[in-house]
Image (spheres, rainbow, N blue to C red):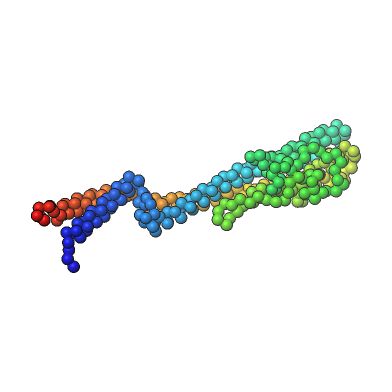
Amino acid sequence: MRITPNITMQNSLYNIQQSRTLLDSINEKISSGMNVNRPSDDPVTARLLTGIADQLKTGNQYASNITKAGNWLQMTNTALTSMNDTMALVKQVAGTVTGGTNDATTVQAAITQLTSLREQLADLGNTQQDGQYLFAGTNTTVKPFDRSVNTAPPATQPVPTDPTYYQGNDNTNAIELAAGSTENLNIPGSQVLTGPSANILWSLDSLISTLKTNPTDQTTITARVNELENGATQIVNAQVVNSTKIKRLDTMTTMNTNTKTTLQSVVANVQNADYAKLAVELQQQQTAFQATLSSTAKISQLSLLNYL
């Protein structure tokens, strides 16, 4: 095959273009600080980085979910703690009317205090977070408890979801903390103030009604006081459940942070430019480029005089 001057010139131009492309690529890496600036630079690495970027985006969403859930659970914990303190006062006041030797002043004082504490419990049950009721189940836009004392309570303890005492539902809102991992965000009020073992609000209504109409009925009074003891335990159990949820969120936060740190380290190792290495490569490529230009100029010294 005859090597013509045209072929020689095309090969020379190709070598110059290749050398220039490599030089431009190194300069771009130095300028951007990244090893991969477009998928064509390294398809395999680009795919890896895209996958990690998706994982980091998902992790940020999980972190946001955990933060929101944490705020909800902390507010729930505050409300439950206040309920527990209120129940301690309820038991203290109720203790003053057991025994059958109470005078009218003591009974009236107990009625006044129990009425106030009953309203306080309902108010705590109506605690809101970002405009949503914490203890309403999934019916978060409806106030779950009526703070008014029922002056004519049912003769027997109603079911936890009786609308007279609870306007919410038994459902829970689940939030995703990680892939395939969720946590129930809320504790329905039917598990706190109206059940499952004691309907605290009804027991208080019944106790107040009994003290008003028949303060010597120690059988009923004692039964209501015992129910309130069970109700206090019920609130403590809800606190334990809620605290367990908070602890899990702490664990998931640590795991999510560690995963994010690991992924960012992988990105840094793969993507961040090594300036010292690139500086050497740049010098070598500049030398090679100048050599290519020089050799091309020497072998391509063509003139019209050569053809005259």
- In this rendering, does residue 30 appear at all? yes
Residue at the (75%, 40%) spot, across then down: 122
Front residue of this view, candidates 144 and 1 = 1
Lateral position of residue 220 relative to residue 84, left or right: right
Residue at the (87%, 34%) spot, across then down: 103
Front residue of this view, candidates 46 and 195 = 46
Front residue of this view, candidates 223 and 206 = 206
Lateral position of residue 306 relative to residue 69, left or right: left
- In this rendering, does residue 85 appear at all? no
Front residue of this view, candidates 75 and 230 = 75
Instruction: Give percent across and percent down for residue 61.
Output: 54, 48
Q: Quadrant of residue 68?
A: top right
Residue at the (39%, 57%) spot, across then down: 43
Q: Residue furthest top?
A: 105
Q: Residue furthest front?
A: 308
| Placement of 138 over or under 121, stated as above or below | below
Residue at the (32%, 47%) spot, across then down: 28
Instruction: Give percent across and percent down for residue 239.
Output: 67, 47
Lateral position of residue 100 relative to residue 235, left or right: right
